Amino acid sequence: MIAAYAHHGCGDEAISLFKKMCNLDKQPNDVTNVGLLAACSHAGLVDEGLKYLDELTRDNSIQIRQEHYACLVDLCGRAGKLMETFEFIQKLPTEPSANIWGALLAECNVHGNTDIGKLASMKILEVEPENTELELAGEEEDDWKWEAEPAMWHPVEDEDPLDVTTLPLLFHGDEVQQEPDLLNP
């Protein structure tokens, strides 16, 4: 249910349900926690999302996964805190995945920050050198945008590019994944 609230941008409802669950002494699992962070992100609840991630990192019974960090990157990126997000990623206790760098890259597109976007692109290629979908192209970097399918920087005429951070999160048991194939029915 929390994931459904997250998907529809109902952050306050997700937080309320999460609190009720905790008051009933129900221990949230990884999927629930990712859903809560995603709900905060999609609803623009930056302070709440940061608070919950801080609580998660203090709880030794919970293993923080890449999906948790990706939600935080999305959360702070949506708030336009791109440099802070880049610095946060650099300090992660684990090697950041291409998904984490991709979330930052998507937000760089939204906010028009090609400098950090290029750094994120290079980090994606460091983590996934076999990533053949990510290419830099275009002569005028001010016109570069990020596009989900195919994933590349290129000059774009349309001022309303696809925001890859809106890809749905699919929850399968204890696994969470973003499903880009839904873009190509």
Image: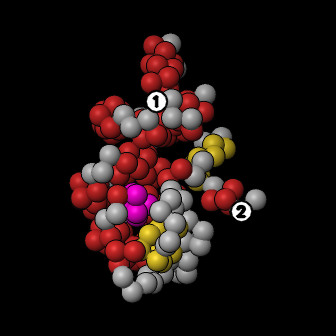
Q: Tell me where residue 169 appears, x and y as whole percent.
A: 59, 47
First to last magenta residue range: 105-110
Query: Is 109 within the magenta?
Result: yes
Mark 1 falls on what kind of element?
helix
Which quarter of the figure is the C terminus placed in?
Answer: bottom right
Q: Amino acid at mark 2?
A: Asn
Observer-nearest of 1 and 109: 109
Residue 37 at least partly seen: no
**Which residue shows up at 47% across the image and 50% down it?**
67
For marks 1 and 2 on the same chain, the one whose residue lies earlier in the sequence: 1
Label 1 vs label 2: CA separation?
A: 28 Å
The residue depicted at 46 percent of the width and 40 percent of the height is 42
Question: What is the quadrant of residue 118 in the picture?
Answer: bottom left
In the picture provided, is 15 more to the left or to the right than 174? left
Residue 54 position (above or below residue 108):
above
Image point 52% across, 66% down: which residue? 158
Task: Examine the structure image and report whether residue 12 is included in the region drawn in magenta.
Answer: no
Q: What's the magenta bit mostly, secondary-structure-wise?
A: helix
x, y (%) of residue 179? 63, 55
- Residue hosting label 2: 184
Q: Residue furthest bottom?
A: 139
117 horizontally vs 156: left or right: left
Height in image: 26 above or below 96?
A: above
Q: Looking at the image, which is closer to me, 173 or 151?
A: 151
- From this view, report whether residue 153 is shown above or below residue 85: below
Instruction: Compare residues 88 and 117 and report the one nearer the observer.
Output: 117
Residue labelled with disc 1: 11
Where disc 2 sits, the SS reads loop
Residue 83 visible in the shown view = yes
| Residue 164 on image: x %, y % | 52, 57
